[in-house]
Image: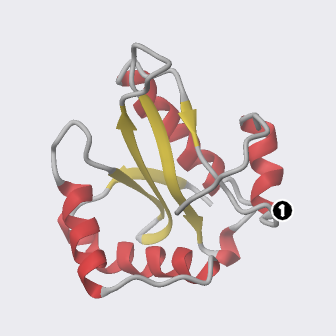
């Protein structure tokens, strides 16, 4: 498998939608059509704090995606990078797609002079955590939300 990581383009909307739907279904979630549309528009916007997206391609087939964004942080002078969503097609997991997408985000963060990249995952997402434990470190925090 020869994976190529490319930025999201307007023409990628159908494959992005399929991949993001797969991601949402993995987490037993869904979003409204309005959220699909606004998210896609934001991913293509050019603002400093707008989210960005990369797709992993195996030839002409999109096989993975990552969404990430930069934001300010009260404990640092430089911005930090939040890797919000990461997904690889189920049949391609374990082939290096997740690693390639994360490393592409690391590269984007480095280009933005942003040394800190972080993300969350479900506690029971053991397959992904096997990769994450090799390329990142857990800090022992528990996520809460309203």
Residue lying farthest to the top in this orientation: 77
- Residue 104 vertical placement versus 61 (above, below): above
Residue at position x 67%, y 76% in the image: 90
Q: Quadrant of residue 1?
A: bottom right
From the top left corner, tell me how far across and down residue 94 is, in percent.
Answer: 76, 61
Q: Nearer the viewer, residue 104 or 70?
A: 70
Which residue is at a point 30% across and 58% down the rendered structure image? 8
Q: Please state if 1 lies on the left or on the right of 55 as rendered.
A: right
Horizontally, residue 73 falls left or right of residue 46, namely right
Q: Is residue 44 above or below residue 72?
A: below
Left or right of 53 on screen, residue 2 = right
Residue indicated by mark 1: 126
- Most foreground residue, 76 or 131: 76
Residue shown at the point (47%, 30%) measured from the top left:
107
Q: Residue at x 29, y 76 (%)?
A: 35
Instruction: Determine whether 16 is above or below 29 in the image.
Output: above
Tell me how the rendering is colored: secondary structure
Q: Is residue 28 left or right of residue 105?
A: right
Locate residue 77: give its quadrant.
top left
- SS at mark 1 in the image: helix
- In the depicted structure, whether residue 100 falls above or below residue 77: below
Number of numbered discs present? 1
User: Label 1: how many residues lie within 10 Å, few (<14), some (14-19) or many (20+)?
Assistant: few
Measured as percent of width and height from the top left, residue 20 is found at: 45, 74
Q: Residue furthest front?
A: 146
What x and y, as percent, mark residue 146?
A: 52, 63
């Amino acid at each position: 498998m020869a994976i190529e990581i490319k930025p999201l383009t307007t023409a990628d909307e159908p494959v992005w939608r399929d991949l993001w739907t797969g991601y949402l279904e993995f987490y037993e979630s869904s979003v409204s059509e309005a959220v699909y549309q606004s998210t896609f528009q934001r991913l293509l916007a050019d603002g400093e704090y707008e989210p960005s997206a990369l797709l992993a391609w195996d030839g002409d087939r999109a096989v993975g995606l990552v969404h990430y964004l930069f934001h300010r942080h009260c404990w640092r002078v430089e911005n930090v990078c939040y890797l919000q969503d990461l997904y690889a097609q189920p049949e391609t997991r374990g082939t290096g797609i997740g690693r390639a997408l994360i490393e592409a985000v690391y590269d984007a963060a480095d280009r933005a002079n942003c040394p800190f990249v972080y993300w969350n995952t479900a506690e029971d997402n053991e397959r992904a955590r096997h990769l994450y434990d090799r390329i990142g470190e857990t800090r022992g925090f528990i996520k809460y939300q309203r």
